[in-house]
């Protein structure tokens, strides 16, 4: 384990690239603004997505040193994809996020402060979901009545 990484934010991804981009950008902003690049990492695993997610994962892999992305050659399913992410995460603590989970500004700094001062066994947080106009969510909202 890399002793410098305190928190790994893991994101299992499947065919929701628009959501994923928004969530990753939210995390990048917090990491950069909080100067957390050396202690927080983002780890994304595209689960054999067919919608542009693998290309997005490749693009963020080469842009940021604190992001690691993986493209699974075959669909593992969400549980095995999460297990994969946990196993490759370098952090002492892990934060599981979905592609559509946003953290409030300052949340990552708050978590790091809490980890450093309290050394908790776990932290429970409440995430905000994205309302998107992409094709998938449009179908969901039309059918949800």
Image (cartoon, rainbow, N blue to C red):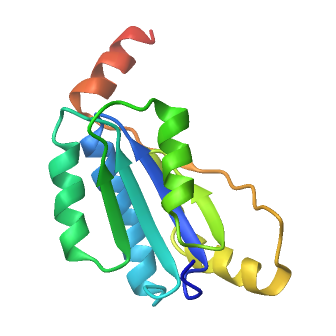
Residue 124 lies, with reference to residue 1, above or below; the image says above
Residue 99 appears in view = no
Residue 92 appears in view = yes
- Residue at x 19% of width, y 72% of height: 62
The C terminus sits in image quarter? top left
- Residue 65 shown left or right of residue 54 in the figure: right
Residue 24 spot, x, y in % from top left: 36, 60
The N terminus sits in image quarter? bottom right
Residue 74 spot, x, y in % from top left: 30, 32
Quarter of the image for residue 119 reads: bottom right
Residue 120 lies, with reference to residue 143, above or below; the image says below
For the image, the number of numbered tags is 0
- Residue at x 53% of width, y 72% of height: 90
Residue 36 spot, x, y in % from top left: 48, 86
Q: In front here: 73 or 55?
A: 73
Quarter of the image for residue 142 reads: top left
- Residue at x 52% of width, y 37% of height: 80
Q: In front here: 14 or 142?
A: 14
Quarter of the image for residue 73 reads: top left
Residue 28 spot, x, y in % from top left: 37, 72
- Residue at x 32% of width, y 54% of height: 70
- Residue 66 shown left or right of residue 135 in the figure: right
């Amino acid at each position: 384990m890399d002793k410098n990484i305190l928190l790994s934010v893991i994101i299992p991804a499947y065919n929701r690239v628009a959501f994923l981009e928004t969530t990753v950008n939210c995390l990048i902003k917090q990491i950069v603004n909080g100067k957390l690049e050396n202690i927080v990492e983002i780890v994304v695993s595209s689960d054999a997505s067919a919608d542009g997610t693998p290309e997005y994962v490749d693009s963020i892999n080469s842009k940021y040193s604190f992001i690691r992305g993986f493209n699974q050659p075959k669909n593992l399913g969400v549980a095995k994809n999460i297990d994969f992410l946990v196993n490759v995460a370098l952090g002492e603590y892990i934060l599981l996020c979905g592609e559509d989970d946003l953290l409030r500004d300052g949340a990552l700094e708050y978590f790091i402060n809490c980890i450093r001062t309290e050394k908790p066994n776990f932290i429970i947080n409440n995430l905000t979901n994205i309302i998107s106009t992409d094709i998938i969510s449009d179908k969901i909202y039309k059918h949800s009545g």
